[in-house]
Image (tube, rainbow, N blue to C red):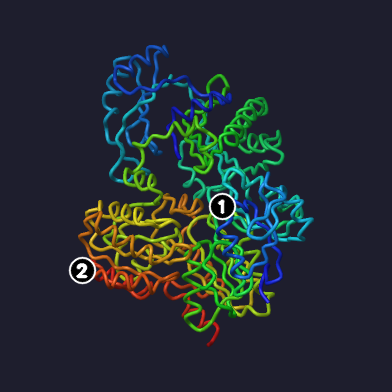
Amino acid sequence: MSILVNKDTKVIVQGFTGKEGTFHASQCMDYGTKIVGGVTPGKGGQEHLGQPVFNTVDEAVKATGATVSMIFVPPAFVADAVMEAADAGIELAVIITEGAPVKDMMYAKAYATKKGMNTIGPNCPGIITAEECKIGIMPGFIFKKGPVGLISKSGTLTYEASNQVVKEGLGITTAVGIGGDPIIGLSYKQLLPMFEADPETEAIVMIGEIGGDLEIQAAKFIKENITKPVVAFIAGQTAPKGKRMGHAGAIISGGSGTAAEKMAALEAAGVKVVVSPADIGKAVKEVMGR
Amino acid sequence: MNIHEYQAKEIFRKYGVPVPRGQVAFTVDEAVEAAKNLGGNLWVVKAQIHAGGRGLGGGVKLAKSLDEVRDWADKILGMTLVTHQTGPEGKLVQKVYIEEGADIKAEFYLGMLLDRAAEMPVMMASTEGGMEIEKVAEESPEKIVKVHIDPAIGFQGFHGRQLAFGLGLPKEEVGTFIKFAKALYDVYMDNDAEMIEINPLIKTGDGKFLALDAKMGFDDNALGRHPDIAEMRDLSEEEPTEVEAKQHGLSYIKLDGNVGCMVNGAGLAMATMDIIKHEGGEPANFLDVGGGANPETVAKGFEIILKDPNVKAIFVNIFGGIVRCDRVANGILEATKLTDVNVPVVVRLDGTNAEEAAEILKNAGIKNIISATDLADGAKKAVEAAK
């Protein structure tokens, strides 16, 4: 078991024939992901990486039965691509592209929600169910199968955390990189209950950062709804106020969104909060009683 | 990206958000000329820098004659203005805005920004004009009226009524206020603003509303479709090293410590700063070399970090995903040839091709390089090396 995606998930790629789309789609296929086609307007009817190319998502869905789309289109076209996927009945859009305007995401997410489509990202590494299905740009070999679910705002910190968990002799069910933009798709609050319900997941790691209040919402939710042990790390404990730390959403504004307040809220919710990012693996082992 | 008050007011005018008449000046003579053009017998000389609290810092002065305009412009132009938002080093004033004086009957606050939790913009109004809104939010949150505006329906009359009646305006002023707020909403949405703040918004003796101040920030990701706004960027308001880094695809922010950091990924870069502190050191910077770390970007990274004389050691922390560690290792070797790296460099490379990378660094035999096995080991060694 796992959450959201597994070895049977049929995936199409929007922006299939572009440089990034091509490279990462072929990496995903090597990992075992069922990429069943892609969309590049104007290139319908061609074949790419051994799979059919379609002009529209609608055609692609009808022809392949795909339920998930991985989006690599340039930033200015992200909103259009997300809304097209939602309109075509895609169930989950994984948006890898970095640099989409916030206003566009506001419209796109509202429409996706209306159509019942989940989104992950934008500006994220994607989602991976270990040794089954990788939809994104993460290095697959780091994610060995095991009992730990992972939710993270940061890409490389996801790899770091998974690596530590694996080094402790454990592994990952599914890892989701939710991205660090101001408006994102699935967040802790939606993903935590999925891991809670997944019989193979025994513990959950959540990695947050400064800015916004998603981690605070997560803390409230965990307190009331999550029975599995949770380990958390919040990046940016030493970040100065008012400075944007790389991610568009990672900024402490008006004294709120600090690492300290998020860590305190999570701790109060019974989460094992680690101060050092090097202690994530050890803490997981500890809360699992292994 | 942030812009100056005078630029924000230009945008306001285009959308029919009422502002006092004014003119920007770069020299004392231009300031006097501007005052003459505006006419009248009362002017305000306002320092143009990207920071709030200018009035308290002595950067906003009232002038009752052209001579006073000259005096104040002379004093303000070239001064280093220190406010609660500039930091103790302050900011050099290179231009002033000359504005006609206004007859202030009441002062309000009106602002707009994205509410990330609601995933839509929120407009906020308060009767506490002139006060810092964060302070009002903390001390008397009941004095702030908040209205979320769903972009699917846009700004409706009821949004305006909630704000206007919330401020306690008499019913004959409500219509004028709604028009003002609606125009402000259009400014925000049309221009991909990230934040607008009018503090104070004033009511004049003859019952008009005017934006006496204007502060605007924009979504960097959307500047591509607003060339007119992108042109308003004032690089002299930004940290020169940060600008230089950005031009090379690096994200750099200077801090006060002595351990330089070079990391791939924003989250890991923040986590690296955190672990340095945890190990008893102080990070000298945030630096994300991005997903495409290559010899040139790594070399540039070293160069930028070493511009800071406080740096006594550098911690290179790369978790290779798509970026292969052997390429980063070669980049480090290349960098030591291109830049004189004269402090110890602790290198931790993990992930894709980490073993090959370790081999490359070992065989290169560079004296300054200390290799580390993992995150904690690297941080410890870097903190030690900086002592």
Residue depicted at 35% across the width and 17% down the height? B64
Which of these two is toward me, B307 or B54?
A: B307
Kindly tell me whether residue B387 is visible in this rendering.
no
Percent of width and height locating residue B200: 49, 33
Q: Chain of mark 1?
A: A
Q: Chain of mark 2?
A: B
For the residue labelled by badge 1, is the local secondary structure a helix, a strand or a loop?
loop
Q: Quadrant of residue B276?
A: bottom left
Looking at numbered disc 2 in the image, what kind of residue is underneath it? Lys
- In the image, what residue occupies the spot 65% across and 30% down? B178
Task: Please provide percent x and percent y for residue B250.
Answer: 39, 51
Q: Secondary structure at mark 2?
A: loop
Q: Splitting the image into 4 quarters, where does residue A62 fall? A: bottom right
Please indicate whether residue A87 sits to the left or right of residue A152 in the image: right
Task: Identify the disc placed on residue A97.
Answer: 1
Instruction: State whether residue B39 is above or below residue B229.
Output: above
- Along the horizontal axis of the image, is B300 left or right of A94? left
Q: Name the spot of residue B79 as percent of width and height, x first.
A: 27, 32
Q: Residue B284, image x and y in percent?
A: 30, 58
Q: Nearer the viewer, residue A173 or B206?
A: A173
Label for residue A256? none
Give the residue number, with chain letter if any, for mark 2. B367
Mark 1–mark 2 distance (CA, rounded to whole Å):
40 Å
Q: Amino acid at mark 1?
A: Thr
Up/down of A60 relative to A237, above or below: above
Q: Is disc 1 surrounded by few (<14), some (14 to 19) or many (20+) residues within 10 Å?
A: many
Asked whether disc 1 touches disc 2, contact meaning CB atoms under 8 Å apart, the reply is no
Relative to B74, say whether B318 is above or below.
below
Q: Relative to the observer, which residue lies in front, B188 or B223?
A: B223
